[in-house]
Image: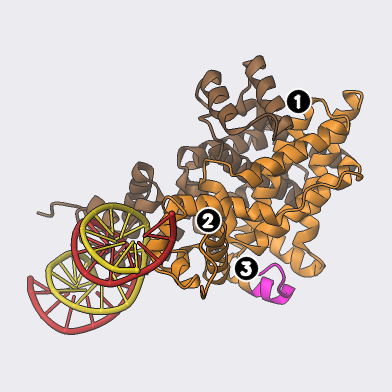
Chain colours: A brown, B orange, C yellow, D red
DNA sequence: ACCTGAACACCGTTCAAGT
DNA sequence: ACCTGAACACCGTTCAAGT
């Protein structure tokens, strides 16, 4: 009786995702992923060509965590929901962004996702060029937002007090007057939320897309 | 007589940038950076705390390559120029994006840059909230655009023919009809340029920002 | 076909030792 | 104060050997 199910490429990639979730991308080594599966590192080479292929697998894996747009929804809330889902998945697995950066061969889940989004817009009346532009702009914005979000010098879910302490130590007002003004304003307002910031920027894009769609007679 | 100038933190970071430019981020090891400077790896530890600090230095270094907005320019072309300069710097040093992802402590050049941009908008009539929103949205878009640009399965500077060959092999039309349609359209048009795509998306954001600025009485 | 152990050429980092 | 060499605990990957 086999103590463990046989290795497959999918099981190897899943294990790598678990290792990355626990210890970050730096901990994803052939040896560590092997250990996660109760197997020697060298066994993995029967299922992935090399470590680069394993990372390609991880880059595709994250797309299994992103919802596809639902057929019945109008395009604007559908795109907003997709953007939120993408942001959530990338933020929940912070290692994934670094991979999206560097992988050059899109995996099957990436292709399926992109095809679905494009199809959704086309069936909802977008001319092909506008669908392309909108898709490209929204995706760029979402990726970039998560980059800056993960890169914040404070925990966005944390308290405003901690935020102020943390940042004002880094930002002397004499040297960076406008950044200091910004920090002070946020400290006063107390309601600053990065989630709101996300939606504000997304609406800037979607507003313009809506104008262009009307101009195109959609 | 000293054969080489004494090590400094700045010289160490410059050397690391050279190593990254030549061989990618993976080649940036303490040993390789040491070799670039004609010095043992262990000597670097007198100038940077550890490898993480060296990477922090690299993440700040890229901002020395990005132009600050010029005082006399109106906000819209100034923001467009800054976006283009940022995109150019990140694309010219592809390793830099992966670092912006993961570093949590902004360096002095990052702070100076952000302060300058914010100040530019404020002096040009932007209320603080709108300046913040615009800055955040533009930066997210630029970062994310470069992510997808570097991630393209073809060389954006290459020929359209190569692009079509490359992509259509990856994208069977039966499985990905909308992606296939997109590829076919681009192949026909022949003029597709990722530079135009960049500006189209940026204009989506800037158009909306302009509307908001007028509403705010700017 | 699938898994393994030893081996090779690398890592980051420590430490005691040199100047 | 600054640089070094040896050492330690890691890497990815190869290869010949096992089942």
Q: For the point 56% across and 20% down, which residue is it?
A: A160
Task: Check contact, mark 3 vs mark 2: CB within 8 A.
Answer: no
Circle nearer the viewer, 3 or 2: 2
Question: Left or right: B102 with respect to B136?
Answer: left
- CA neighbours of label 1 inside 10 A, class few (<14), some (14 to 19), many (20+): few
Q: Are marks 3 and 2 on the same chain?
A: yes
Q: For the point 77% across and 40% down, which residue is it?
A: B117
Q: What residue sits right under mark 2 in the picture?
A: B9
* Chain letter belonging to callout 2: B
Q: What residue sits right under mark 3 in the picture?
A: B167
Q: Which mark is residue B166?
A: none
Mark 3 and mark 2 lie on one chain; the one further toward the N terminus is 2
Residue B85 visible somewhere in the drawing: yes
Q: What residue sits right under mark 1 in the picture?
A: B129
Q: Quadrant of residue B197?
A: bottom right
Is residue B155 within the magenta segment? Answer: yes
Image: magenta residue range: B154-165
Question: Left or right: A169 with respect to A182?
Answer: left
Circle nearer the viewer, 3 or 1: 1
- Where residue B63 appears, as percent x and y from the top left, is 66, 51
Is residue A45 within the magenta segment? Answer: no
């Amino acid at each position: 009786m086999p103590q463990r199910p046989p290795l497959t490429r999918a099981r190897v990639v899943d294990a790598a995702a678990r290792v990355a979730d626990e210890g970050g991308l730096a901990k994803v080594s052939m040896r560590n992923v092997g250990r996660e599966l109760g197997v020697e590192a060298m066994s993995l080479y029967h299922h992935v060509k090399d470590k680069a292929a394993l990372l390609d697998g991880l880059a595709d894996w994250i797309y299994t965590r992103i919802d596809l747009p639902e057929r019945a929804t109008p395009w604007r809330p559908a795109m907003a929901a997709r953007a939120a889902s993408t942001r959530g998945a990338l933020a929940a697995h912070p290692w994934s962004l670094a991979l999206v950066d560097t992988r050059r061969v899109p995996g099957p889940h990436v292709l399926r996702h992109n095809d679905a989004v494009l199809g959704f817009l086309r069936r909802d009346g977008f001319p092909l060029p506008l669908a392309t532009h909108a898709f490209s702009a929204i995706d760029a914005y979402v990726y970039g937002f998560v980059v800056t979000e993960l890169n914040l010098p404070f925990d966005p879910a944390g308290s405003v007090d901690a935020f102020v302490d943390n940042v004002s130590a880094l930002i002397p007002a004499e040297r960076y007057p406008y950044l200091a003004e910004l920090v002070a304003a946020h400290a006063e307002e107390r309601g600053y939320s990065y989630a709101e910031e996300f939606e504000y920027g997304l609406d800037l894009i979607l507003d313009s897309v809506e104008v262009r769609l009307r101009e195109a007679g959609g």
